[in-house]
Image (cartoon, coloured by chain):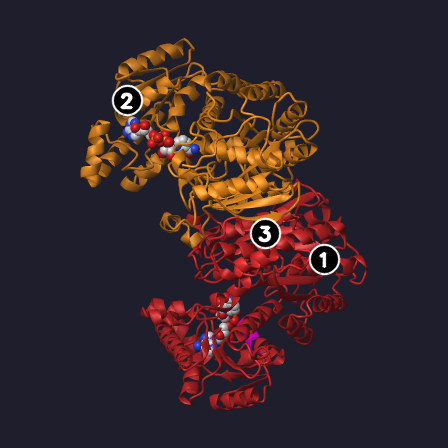
Chain colours: A red, B orange
Amino acid sequence: RRYQGSPTGTDIECRGWRQEAVLRMLNNNLDPEVAERPEDLVVYGGTGRAARSWDAYDAILAELRELADDETLLVQSGKPVGVFRTHERAPRVLIANSNLVGKWDDWEHFHELEAEGKTMYGQMTAGSWAYIGTQGILQGTYETLAELGRQHFPDEEGLRGRTVVTGGLGGMGGAQPLAVTMNGGVCIAAEVDEDRIDRRIETGYCMEKTDSVAEAVERAEAAAAADESYSVGVHGNAADVLEAMLERGFVPDAVTDQTSAHDELEGYYPSGYTVEAADELRERDPERYVEESVDTMERHVDAILEMQDRGAVAFEYGNNIRGQVQSYTGRDDAFDFPGFVPAYIRPLFCRGKGPFRWVALSGDPEDIRRTDDAVLDLFPDDDRLARWIRLAREEVQFQGLPARVCWLGSRTDDEGVSERARFALKINELVADGEISAPIVVTRDHLDAGSVASPNRETEAMRDGTDAVADWPILNALVNCAAGADVVSVHDGGGVGIGNALHANNHVVLDGSDLAAEKARAVFTTDPGMGVVRHADAGYEEALDEAARSGVRVPMPP
Amino acid sequence: RRYQGSPTGTDIECRGWRQEAVLRMLNNNLDPEVAERPEDLVVYGGTGRAARSWDAYDAILAELRELADDETLLVQSGKPVGVFRTHERAPRVLIANSNLVGKWDDWEHFHELEAEGKTMYGQMTAGSWAYIGTQGILQGTYETLAELGRQHFPDEEGLRGRTVVTGGLGGMGGAQPLAVTMNGGVCIAAEVDEDRIDRRIETGYCMEKTDSVAEAVERAEAAAAADESYSVGVHGNAADVLEAMLERGFVPDAVTDQTSAHDELEGYYPSGYTVEAADELRERDPERYVEESVDTMERHVDAILEMQDRGAVAFEYGNNIRGQVQSYTGRDDAFDFPGFVPAYIRPLFCRGKGPFRWVALSGDPEDIRRTDDAVLDLFPDDDRLARWIRLAREEVQFQGLPARVCWLGSRTDDEGVSERARFALKINELVADGEISAPIVVTRDHLDAGSVASPNRETEAMRDGTDAVADWPILNALVNCAAGADVVSVHDGGGVGIGNALHANNHVVLDGSDLAAEKARAVFTTDPGMGVVRHADAGYEEALDEAARSGVRVPMPP
Ligand SMILES: NC(=O)c1ccc[n+]([C@@H]2O[C@H](COP(=O)([O-])OP(=O)(O)OC[C@H]3O[C@@H](n4cnc5c(N)ncnc54)[C@H](O)[C@@H]3O)[C@@H](O)[C@H]2O)c1
Ligand SMILES: NC(=O)c1ccc[n+]([C@@H]2O[C@H](COP(=O)([O-])OP(=O)(O)OC[C@H]3O[C@@H](n4cnc5c(N)ncnc54)[C@H](O)[C@@H]3O)[C@@H](O)[C@H]2O)c1
């Protein structure tokens, strides 16, 4: 264990703030408050690492401390491999993680190389040093549900008076109850593991728990009728809980699921077992476990479909429960409800909307408070954004360096400056004026418009069938490098596993300088702009409309 | 057919020479003198295209004509998809061709998308607009054989007095006799198709032909004894020709092969058939064809192994004849002779040596003559380079824009400037001084040190087993973008097919300006430098030595 600690404050160890920013982001990723298993360099997602080894970590920090303002450090799957002279406007750090040549691009070859210390799994924000704890998933879930509300209940504010039923309160799924209540709605979440419900209640992500479906439904209906936000965890198997609701004649306004259905043996629990009994069955008779697990999934999907038939809005939340049921049972009707990206996220992607997260390098929560004020000030008409920022202020506990995330897009103002650029330039001014005590780093995650090719998630069911075309993330990385982002990275795998996605990330350091302003103006036009051109090329009307409104040049519109 | 012609001269249609250079390189790729099937936009390699369609071609040219000095055009698999404001030191064009997410990264998915017009096969230099005709393969073959000479016959100048036996005088293999004679040696090449031999004789690539192995061997031995360079095509099946040589007790100094053994049905010819008879058999009974073809390959490999046993230097020239025999017969001893990259090219890669090609945008051969003089002048001690340049002047007919290629590396002078940078800076001066009439573009091909991951060719049998790690080409593209190359591209497939390789390319336009000098100095340090760091990381001593000599920073030497 050789963690060097997460520096804060206004004194720096590096030769400039842009190098210092990278050093702090890397250390923040490994902060025990932030990382899942910092002792193994694992940040999140099971095996997503920030560096290949402690030696590599030390060497990266040493290089960053020496790096000149016109030099660029190269990091290959978590290991520093070269330093070259470039120029000041160019990135300080370039990263490529976990990439394999197509024919070898699978877990088997990856694990062989990993075992020999030749590569590392970087996930998306672990190896690109952009993880900020659970706020990211909370905001993504908030945004998805807000869009659902906008589409299906346009006359309400958010999900006010609406009830959402879901399953799974794990690492990511645990964000669901809070994301629903932040949207003003009511959430009933089925979770088989009572400890998980307790943890969500302790951290304020869920309000109450119960063993009784009847009780949960009654309380939910009462809260919805009173237009009050409310959340309750129901201790039980999601398939059983949904069936019990249907038996009672209860149909929610929306239904989804975040049990770990993508893994039929290690993730999803079969009906009829406690957690302990199921764990014992998995050990003793894994084949039988899988059989029962898949049987439960089929009932689970049937219940979702039945709720949909009776009027609920149904969608899959990226856990592949539809695919599992289809491939085990051959039932194509498992896909009779849509995935969350095509349904709710893509319309935002078409407009370049996507995650924009910023981190206060000072470590001072006051700095984030100033940015919160600034964003509310800049976009006074964006209710969804305002609701998120106000609630995030109250509900989100910072982990490691104080940070914030919200979704902004390509929409330009009268001077042709995009939403993202406008906000970044405002932050940069505040840093220049000393209103913010130290530079701010802006980065994002992978649920992004123009930097991801991921046929099972971000690019599922593209209108023109180009789900697997991987030119886009590469162009995104190259154009952000050309625009002058301070860190640019390209990675294989991320949340969907080796060979299943290619994605790119970037950081821009807002240190109050004119150079930072130039970089911000360019990167925060190109980065969301890539989302617009990618979706325009695929034939989405919203993207073509956004291109026309926001001056994004599309040479060959379809 | 909507080819707009290949502009030359000193007047430009674009807003700057860097845009004009790209426009001319693209058009040069499609020049009927250069391209294989220009009417289909195919430049070389069967299906390697310069643009996705004629509409896309028109649109690319239109965008280039409008592109400002601080804008960047994005090209996605041969189609222009966006234009963004970046800055002057950044690339003008960024290209990503044929890339697919790993799990879908195969011909089947590629062809589906291609049929719908959603992607294009860009090969390596076709879609990156860097093809210069057959000079490239000639020079690569020359360099390989020169290195063989250096390693095995260190006391001779090149291959003087040495005999090389090979097979195949096709598109690439046809360069072999001339590459041998340019190295001062003697070549006997077996070719079953007499027309191919005739074509090589017409174009001056081969001197004579014969049907008789005895005659070929006699003449070869006489020439070698007299230290004269000589080449002869033997009309016959390579397996038969090699066996006949062994029967006569003839063992050459070196033996290799460039028949199309990688394709047992459409490429390689079985013994006992004329070309016509074999073509007929292929139609009538493809299974029998494959059986006989593979039988012949096995005899062919046995003959090579026998020659090796009797003292010849044997190597495979990238046609996979070893792999074919191994997979069809299970004989692992097929791999008892090495591939050409590990044997001869990798030692050069370790020192950042690789292809450096430059093109005279004026169209004036005089401009290339001046660069020839300059390179001879700059590197007076490099005999291999001098021999190549002098002979290329005499033997190479320009196709399309006049061009030259040679291999240069990372080695720095007293002021820390690499070979490649030194030469580029010299050219830039000549352009500034008006000694060269219009700007020169520098680019390269794929047989390169630090920009390719290709487990069957460039990265075959890496010392540390990292053949399939694809982080390197991505870092190469990013760092060249950061250094300010004018075009940067990343592609899947190239000469070994979809899913089998990832590689990057770049162009730098030497227009005589200070900006060009800055770009050249940076790119021609980073680009060969990536070769040094990649091989240093894999544990090659030569690379670690070169890093130490030439000031290439390797943070964690193994
Ligand atoms: N961006 C996205 O696409 C996205 C976002 C969030 C989550 N997801 C997916 O959602 C799933 C959950 O992710 P996570 O990180 O929270 O996983 P996790 O393993 O941490 O949590 C899963 C939870 O589900 C519970 N569970 C399993 N089977 C159950 C059943 N039949 N009934 C009730 N509870 C059950 C488990 O006890 C556990 O608490 C994964 O499949 C993940 O890939 C995708
Ligand atoms: N960089 C590299 O790795 C590299 C470089 C050059 C060539 N190659 C490989 O070399 C091979 C040749 O390439 P090409 O472009 O010249 O192919 P090609 O198909 O144009 O030419 C092959 C020639 O071999 C002849 N031939 C086939 N079988 C024969 C036999 N049994 N005996 C005698 N002649 C025979 C054919 O008539 C033809 O002229 C390919 O497999 C290619 O991949 C690899």
Q: Are marks 2 and 1 in contact (CB under 8 Å)?
A: no
Q: What residue type is labelled 1?
A: Leu
Res A308 quadrant in image:
bottom left
Q: Name the residue under label 2.
A: B194
Res B91 quadrant in image:
top right
Q: Mark 1 points at which residue?
A: A425
Q: Mark 3 points at which residue?
A: A489
Q: SS at mark 1?
A: helix
Q: In this view, does B526 lie above or below A497?
A: above
Q: SS at mark 2?
A: helix
Label 3 vs label 1, nearer the camera: 1
- In reply to whether residue A219 is colored magenta, the answer given is no
Q: Residue B386 in the image: x percent, y percent?
A: 55, 18
Label 2 vs label 3, nearer the camera: 2
Say which residue appears at 81% left-offset and 59% top-offset. A433
What segment carries the magenta color?
A171-177
Label 2 vs label 1, nearer the camera: 1
Distance CA(mark 2)–CA(mark 3) = 52 Å
Q: Tell which residue pokes out farthest to the top in this image.
A: B226
Q: Would residue A513 be seen by someone viewing this image from the given angle?
A: yes
Q: Mark 2 lies on which chain?
A: B
Q: Is residue B231 above or below residue A499?
A: above
- In reply to whether residue A173 is colored magenta, the answer given is yes
